[in-house]
Image (cartoon, grey):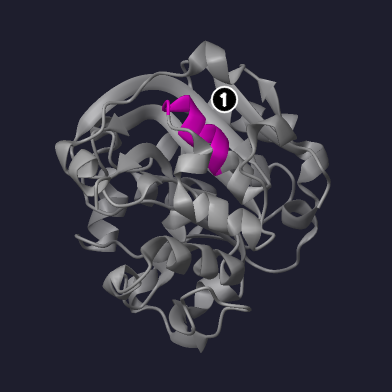
Amino acid sequence: MCNISRVAIIKGSDPTEITVRALEALKLDLDVVLSTEKPILIKPNYITAQHPSTGITTDGKVVEGVVKFLKERGKDNIIIGEGSGWAETFEAFKVAEIDKISEKWKVKLVDLNKDVFVEVYPPNPMALRKVKVAKTALESVIISVPKLKLHRLTTVTLGIKNMMGALASKGSMHNGRLHANIADLASVLKPSLTVIDGIIAGEGHETSGNPVKMDLVIAGTDPVAVDAVGAAVMGVSPTEVEHLVLAEKKGLGTCQLEKIEVIGEPIEKVKRKFRRSITSKILEHF
């Protein structure tokens, strides 16, 4: 991996447009995504079936921006897939209008909770020795499209943690060392591109429904670097996020801001100190 990772931060009022602009700014980095013959899995975050305006779920317009960018470059084997944690996946798709995007752009929708699962063994595991993963995710180039938001247990929930939606048992990740498990999972399901939906972000925690209007898209091909920039935009030091530090140790990317070239808006110009939930503050002491 090169010493400098590039991450785009694009601000604007049209989510689809700024998503396309972010990806166009990164086109020199997108060889893996644009040259692949494998299916491309776009993996949003629909932990619940709540509307993206709540700051909990991925904005469908950001997903559409990714699809539009790919389609205009001749990519047809595109899947939008998610395994919702607390809702019926297709109900969540409907609320975010992913069903309409699927129909408009002729993109396949997959409920990863109902996929075939394959047992895999992360290389050089820190904690996660084996895990059952959706076959669709294993066989695809992955584009992670998470929401920009905080989390009670993992401080932030962004592109790397979003891969938990492709597991047969999401709850099993909470057994033992959660952050190490997430880093190990990233070595098996490593996003080739991360596109963070920061249109309406979420402070408090992952399902608190405390929306923060940011009008941002954050994107890049180094999954650790994109999450690090996303954390910094929320006023969280990337080195405070244990799974990012561990993912860097595993060679999956960098969480050191000085090694990241930010294209577009500077972090300092768009950052805001997100309020954390009381639960998060209590857990920090244990």
Residue 83 visible (yes or no): yes
Q: Amino acid at mark 1?
A: Ile
At 52% from the left and 41% from the top, the residue drawn is 239
Q: Which x, y percent locates residue 160?
A: 50, 54
The total number of labels drawn is: 1
In the figure, 215 relative to 204: above or below? Answer: above
Instruction: Please determine whether, in this image, residue 248 is positioned above or below residue 282.
Output: below
Q: Residue at x 48, y 26 (%)?
A: 233
Residue 142 point in image, percent of width and height: 59, 60
In front: 256, or 40?
Answer: 256
Residue furthest toward the front?
A: 285
Residue at 68% over, 26% down:
262
Q: Residues within 10 Å of mark 1 (few under 14, many from 20)?
A: many
Q: Quadrant of residue 251?
A: bottom right
User: In the image, is 232 to the left or to the right of 97?
Assistant: right
Q: Which residue is mark 1?
A: 18
Residue closest to the far bottom: 119
Please say if 98 is above or below 137: above
The residues colored magenta run 227-235
Instruction: Identify the element where label 1 is drawn.
Output: helix
Q: Position of residue 159 (x, y in %)?
A: 50, 49
Q: Is 16 contained in the magenta span?
A: no
Provide the major secondary structure of the magenta segment: helix
Q: Residue 154: where, in percent of width, then height?
A: 35, 51
Magenta span contains residue 231: yes
Furthest toward the top, the residue is 269
The image quadrant that residue 35 belongs to is bottom right
